[in-house]
Image (spheres, rainbow, N blue to C red):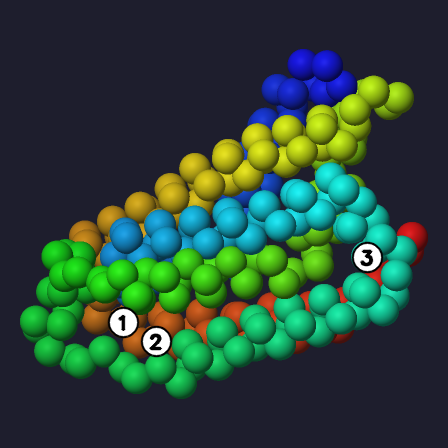
Amino acid sequence: MSGIDHIGLFIVAGLLLNLTPGPDVLYIVTQAMRSGVRAGVAAALGISAGCFVHIAAAAVGVSALMAASATAFAVLKWAGAAYLVYVGARMLLARSAPENPDAINFIATSKGTICASALKSLFFQGFWTNALNPKVALFFLAFVPQFIVPGAENQPLAFLLLGLLFNANALGVNIGWALAAAWLVRHFTALAQGMHWLQRAAGLMFVGFGLKLALTDQPPA
């Protein structure tokens, strides 16, 4: 493809990066284990939609501007940190699922249904978890250009195409995480019985991710 170099290596590197657990994977896995495959897929789709924001921004140069501007970076950093802490706090403060066989069976078999409004909420939580994270924008700015031929005629288009390819691969991996998490809960009843504590642990980790982001310094321009 004109303007793009080592596309095979790009795909492999992208898959390996997407397999690495982080806030996005944690959010998908938690929702899939708590409410089933549909919830995990909704979370994955939301995160993928948030990633499109970073791809478009990087392609038109907004991410480069953010990397060069301490103010722009700080605004997005604090917004993202606050949102991660907010999501974590909601997990920590959420009411426990009823400890009875019927409730456990509902979680373990994923036979229950989750309403459209709940799926929409999970989608937008995933979207904002990703879209408000400046580290994702800076990642695209640092990673993708390595696979664009120097001096290519239409570098923004090459960047956009690579970003879309990366996001498509990421969506497949994230849906895989959702399927795996839901499968584990269906086949291991102890996980379903311990969902209250798993959700609390995930909440603490989200708060930790938020605090870590808040303490992140702007990278040198």
C-alpha distance separating marks 1 and 2: 6 Å
C-alpha distance separating marks 1 and 3: 42 Å
Residue closer to the observer: 117 or 142 = 117
Q: Would you identify the image quadrant in which residue 114 lies?
A: bottom left
Q: Would you identify the image quadrant in which residue 11 lies?
A: top right
Give the amino acid type for the residue marked by disc 2 in the picture.
Trp
Would residue 156 appear left or right of 178 to someone viewing this image? Answer: right
Give neighbour class at mark 3: few <14, some 14-19, many 20+ (Cα, 10 Å).
many
Give the amino acid type for the residue marked by disc 1 in the picture.
Gly
Task: Tell me whether the residue at label 1 lies in contact with that at label 3, contact meaning CB atoms closer than 8 angstroms.
Answer: no
Q: What residue sits 64% from the left and 29% below the top? A: 161
The location of residue 95, given as percent across then percent down, is: 30, 84
Badge 1 element: loop
Residue 14, relative to residue 57: is it above or below? above
Residue 201, relative to residue 27: is it above or below? below
Mark 1 or mark 3: which comes first in sequence? 3
Would residue 91 appear left or right of 136 to someone viewing this image? Answer: left
Residue placed furthest toward the right: 221
Mark 3, residue position? 66
